[in-house]
Image (cartoon, grey):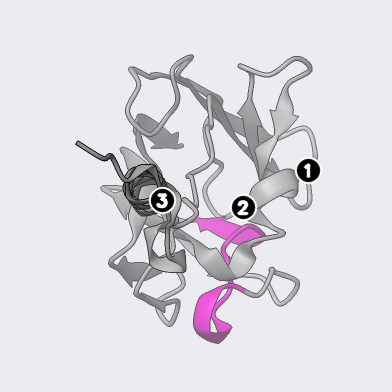
């Protein structure tokens, strides 16, 4: 029997080329990705471990009310401890200074000036009082926030008649809408970087 080696070699070459093309197709299907497959960048919320509110009497710098909240795991969802030192004087005006730190970093990170203010269009402070004769205004020097609002980082507070109650401060991240027309502020949507209520605030 005469064997046609030329035909056998041609068949082997064809099989080799087919296997090579099949392998290339499989490799391409596993490695090729469209732009839609790339994960979207995540805009992570800031880690804040320490909140400090310092109210200083605008005519008597020695009259200071200090409120602090500390949560080593973060104020957003960690267990926090609140402290209040001092009381408001009836009829007095107070300028508020806010401090926000991330003490999980060394040295501690200044979140307010490092993240919040540079991204003011993505943040909004909302305040509320309950039982307190305490009003506030967002200063003309306040930072511009979302939709032409004031961020709420530079504010002035007026203490009224003697009273006892709570003061709440919230920092909203990427709110859908904001309104600062009542000064304390309101917001819809977004998420809370923190929501802290100081209980037992005194005006006397």
Q: Residues within 10 Å of mark 2 (few under 14, many from 20)?
A: some
Between discs 1 and 3, the one toward the N terminus = 3
Whether residues under marks 1 and 2 lie with C-beta atoms below 8 angstroms apart, the answer is yes
Does residue 184 lie above or below 63 as drawn? below
Which picture quadrant has residue 105? top right
Give the magenta part as a residue range. 145-159
Q: Which mark is residue 179?
A: none
In which quadrant of the rendered image does the N terminus lie? top left
**In this figure, which residue is indicated by the disc labeled 2?**
92
Q: Residue at x 41, y 59 (%)?
A: 126
Given the current orientation, which residue lies at the most extreme front position? 1
Q: Which residue is more in the foreground, 21 or 12?
A: 12
Can the viewer see residue 134? no
Q: Which residue is more in the foreground, 163 or 156?
A: 156
Can the viewer see residue 21? yes
Q: Secondary structure at mark 3?
A: helix
Q: Residues within 10 Å of mark 1 (few under 14, many from 20)?
A: few
Q: Nearer the viewer, mark 1 or mark 3?
A: 3
**In this figure, which residue is indicated by the disc labeled 3?**
17
**Spatial distance from mark 2 to mark 3, Cα to Cα?**
89 Å
Residue 174 position in % (x across, y down): 43, 64
Is 148 magenta? The answer is yes
Q: Secondary structure at mark 2?
A: loop
Which picture quadrant has residue 97? top right
Residue 142 position in % (x across, y down): 69, 69
**In this figure, which residue is indicated by the disc labeled 1?**
60
Q: Residue at x 55, y 59 (%)?
A: 158
């Amino acid at each position: 029997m005469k064997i046609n080696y030329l035909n056998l070699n041609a068949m082997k070459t064809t099989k080799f080329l087919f296997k090579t093309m099949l392998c290339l197709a499989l490799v391409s299907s596993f490695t090729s990705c469209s732009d839609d497959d790339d994960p979207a960048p995540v805009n992570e919320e800031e880690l804040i471990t320490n909140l400090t509110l310092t109210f200083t009497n605008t005519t008597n710098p020695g009259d200071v009310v200090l409120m602090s909240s500390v949560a080593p795991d973060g104020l957003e969802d960690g267990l926090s401890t609140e402290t209040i030192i001092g009381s408001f004087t009836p009829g007095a005006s107070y300028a508020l200074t806010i401090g926000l730190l991330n003490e999980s970093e060394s040295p501690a990170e200044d979140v307010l000036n490092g993240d919040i203010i540079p991204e003011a269009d993505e943040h909004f402070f909302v305040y509320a009082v309950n039982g307190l004769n305490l009003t506030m205004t967002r200063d003309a020097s306040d930072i511009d926030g979302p939709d032409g609002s004031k961020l709420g980082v530079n504010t002035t507070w007026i203490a009224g008649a003697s009273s006892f109650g709570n003061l709440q401060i919230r920092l909203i991240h990427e709110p859908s809408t904001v309104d600062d027309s009542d000064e304390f502020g309101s917001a819809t949507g977004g998420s809370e970087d923190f929501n802290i209520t100081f209980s037992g605030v005194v005006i006397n």
